[in-house]
Amino acid sequence: MSSTFEPEAIRRDFPILAKSFRGKPLAYLDNAATAQKPDAVIDAIASYYRESNANVHRGIYALAEEAEVAYHDARKLVARHLNVDQEEIVFVRGTTEALNLVAQTYARENLSEGDVVLLTAMEHHANVVPWQMVTERTGAVIKVAPIDDRGCIDLDALWALLDANPVKLLSLTHVSNSLGTINPVSEIVSEARKRGVVTVVDGAQSAPHGPIDLKALGCDFFAFSGHKLFGPMGIGVLFGRKELLAEMPPYHGGGDMIDEVTFEKTTFAEPPQRFEAGTPNVAGAIGLGAAVEYFRGLDLDAVAAHEQSLHDQAQAGLESLPGVTIHGKAPDKAAVLSFSLEGIHPADVATFLDSQGIAVRAGHHCCQPLMEILGVPATVRASFAFYNLPEEVNRLVDTVRKTIDCFK
Ligand code: PMP
């Protein structure tokens, strides 16, 4: 692993970045969809399967113990990274499963007719649909805090919604995957908690960009996906405050989540095991532990500065072109840049970029309600990670320029 922050050197930790597509070197600018994996993660997974594979929780032989220790060590690494206790870390498949878990356990148990679940206008479908599913069953209702023209949550409107309604739960994204807005989550959480509102933070897009201190953030639940944090797919984390997890019924039933089972009745294990029914994704957890370690080993201030500079370079370059609209101009932004070109469909832009080996995403980014507010069916989204280079941003801007010329 690289010890100091030099993007060129860091790229060598990520074998996929050396590939070419369409005869051009890959410029991977779709990091908000999933991030690439360093050798440290790939090797940790391979080494688990080569040397330590056994089912956890069930074996009394040495190999099973080794697997079990590695699985729980991964939980410790994640807990330390988030500055919480390991009992507060539930391994899940990803952010989507984490949010569904909270909706179908905590919320289903605690919401009643007329209670309000408060969301914001920039939520990913993963932070909308689970709440619709649970409010339909409980008679609770969803209200949505609006955003302004820059793509920031309208805080006055949010406070008013908090005051005027029997809000039970507020669930919001830390960083918008479509607009890049970094929301003032600790301020919002603190206002919500003053009013006795339980808070859920979707950290899918914030976890890959810097340290996360959940003690400082103060939220009740926090969710993120391993694959966006340079770890494997199929593993993610739900943090839940101890007191809340302790009260919650299980999500899935089965092996490993029980205390005692008879045909008449089952008593359940303590958290986090209560929420981890069945054989867990041991290799995934170990890969995530390796990803967290890799990420913590970087100079995260330098990472933030580098990503910000790539973002600013891309924004300035794109804004210098005719007919470009940037969606999302919050003062506090992660390195996510959504844009549209007048008269050119986002899918055509992405296809042009792909012809030059540049990977971006075109679509609604699982934010259809937000797209409706923006008045567009889709956007093109370039999203950067610490291993991206200014040359890649130049290629992005040049190819967008050529696309505009082509459609003239
Ligand atoms: N929330 C946000 C803000 C996201 O960007 C994503 C992934 N695009 C998700 C939730 C869902 O994450 P996953 O698909 O890994 O469960």
Image: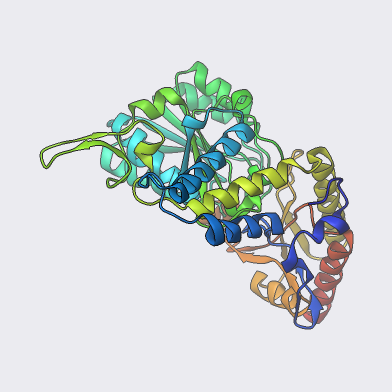
Q: Position of residue 352 (x, y in %)?
A: 74, 77
Determine if residue 127 is in view: no
* Image vertical order of residue 261 relative to residue 236, above or below: above
Q: How many marks?
A: 0
Q: Position of residue 31 (x, y in %)?
A: 68, 57
Q: Please state which of residues 403 and 394 is positioned toward the viewer in this rendering.
A: 394
Q: Please state which of residues 128 and 277 is positioned toward the viewer in this rendering.
A: 277
Q: Is residue 198 left or right of residue 138?
A: right
Q: Is residue 232 left or right of residue 358?
A: left
Which quarter shows the C terminus? bottom right
Q: Is residue 110 left or right of residue 69?
A: left
Which residue is outermost to the left? 264
Determine if residue 153 is in view: yes
Model colouring = rainbow
Which residue is outermost to the top? 194
Q: Within the image, what quadrant is residue 196 found in? A: top left
Q: What residue is drawn where x is 85% and y is 54%?
A: 7
Q: Within the image, what quadrant is residue 256 found in? A: top left
* Image vertical order of residue 227 relative to residue 392, above or below: above
Q: What residue is drawn where x is 74% and y is 46%?
A: 329
Q: Position of residue 247 (x, y in %)?
A: 33, 26
Q: What residue is drawn where x is 82% and y is 38%?
A: 301
Q: Within the image, what quadrant is residue 107 found in? A: top left
Q: Please state which of residues 246 and 337 is positioned toward the viewer in this rendering.
A: 246
Q: Position of residue 233 (x, y in %)?
A: 55, 58
Q: What residue is drawn where x is 52% and y is 56%?
A: 368
Which residue is outermost to the front? 62
